[in-house]
Amino acid sequence: MLTLLVLCMSFGTLSLLAFGGGSAMLPEMARMCVAHGWASGDEFTLLYNLGQLAPGPNCMMVLTIGHKVAGLPGAAAVLVGFFVPPALLAYGLGRAYRKFNDSPNQEWFRRSMAPISVGLTLAGVHLMASSALHGAGALLIFALALYGLTRYQRCHPFFMVLLGGLLGVALL
Amino acid sequence: MSQTVKTRTVSPLKVFTTFLILGATSIGGGMMAHIREAVVVREGWMSDEEFLECYGLCQTLPGLNTTNLSVLIGDRVAGGWGALAAMLAVMAPGGGIVLGLATYFLNGPAPAWTFAGLKGVAAVSVALLFTAALKVGRKLFGNSVDLQIVLLTFLCVGVFHLSLPLTLGIMLPVSLWMKRPEVAVC
């Protein structure tokens, strides 16, 4: 029961600090999971990559951390903790916004937040790379994906994910 | 800019099915474009301007942009129940699939080739995350103030391993000050 509460509270706190979307909070989420002993760094990477194979919002993999720690109740605790607080905030502010529309301050905040989000996301890239890019095969797939994603921007990213999986089976 | 709150007559059930399909079919990022396509173009629930207003608001809020956007759109077109329906529906398919996959990988002895495949997926994930950061960052890297904030934030988390609350506590005031309206005109 205590575990469920800790899961719910930890992911709740994280969700309210998650400015700049899901990828900006990856380093903090990984840190939190390792600190609580919920997942090792490599397990976290594995779960994150499973998440890449599922449709929908990009952070549904948080449920798997709860599930790993405490089964379905754990997944439910994370679901409530991680998704409900920001949703309530969005609901409340969305309604307030339609009454009091203060775009200059909002614009200022958004412009100030944007470079921070990019910095946080790059830290996430650094973290994922240090656990995922080991060996020549992985580096080759990374380089090919980077080339493919910048060269063929019209191509659907999921196609690259599938191709990476197939190449992984063949090479790694 | 101020807009009268319109009451619309979309049923929460219709919102639920629309977002359920979105949640099941948008894979590998780019969900915003899918949502816009469904809500603005196919269903005609709101104008492009209104969609962008919701999207802009989402970017200033914490949490996942997609779920926040679902809540805002659900609320606008079908009220409180619409907001709840949109959020649950957009998460349900991905949540179910990812739980199934995790159970398979963490509980049973999964065959070795599946792990090799996942390593391939991992390498692509890094590239995806990197290009996503660059796509947003490209507009910022030309501006020295923005670039400094990006690098400082990266140092805080990536090198000094400061926690997210601490990083935000340091960087948000710094960034707000560096980009205060009378200085940063662009």
Image (cartoon, grey):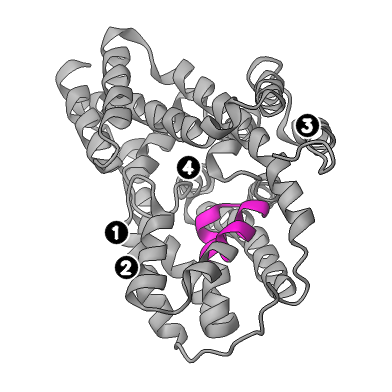
Q: Main secondary structure of the magenta part?
A: helix
Instruction: Measure the C-alpha gap from mark 2 to mark 3.
Output: 39 Å
> Which residue is situated farthest in the left direction here?
A170
In the image, taking residue B99 as reference, residue B12 lies left or right, namely right
Q: Amino acid at mark 4?
A: Lys
Q: Position of residue A9 (x, y in %)?
A: 70, 50
Q: Amino acid at mark 2?
A: Ile
Q: Amino acid at mark 1?
A: Thr
Q: Residues within 10 Å of mark 1 (few under 14, many from 20)?
A: some
Q: Amino acid at mark 3?
A: Met
Up/down of B84 relative to B109, above or below: below
> Which residue is situated farthest in the front direction here?
B185
Question: Residue A142, can we see it?
Answer: yes
Mark 4 lies on residue = A68
Question: Residue B95, can we see it?
Answer: no
Under tag 2, what secondary structure?
Answer: helix
From the viewer's side, name the closer residue of A66 and B98. Answer: B98
Under tag 4, what secondary structure?
Answer: helix
Marks 1 and 3 in Cβ contact (< 8 Å) = no
> Which residue is situated farthest in the top direction here?
A136
Write the start and end of the magenta stretch as one range.
B54-70
Q: Earlier in the sequence, mark 2 or mark 3?
A: 2
Q: Tell me which residue sits at (44%, 53%) in the image.
A: A57
Mark 1 lies on residue = B25
Mark 3 lies on residue = B171
Q: Nearer the viewer, mark 1 or mark 3?
A: 3
| B62 is within the stretch colored magenta | yes
| B36 is within the stretch colored magenta | no
Mark 2 lies on residue = B21
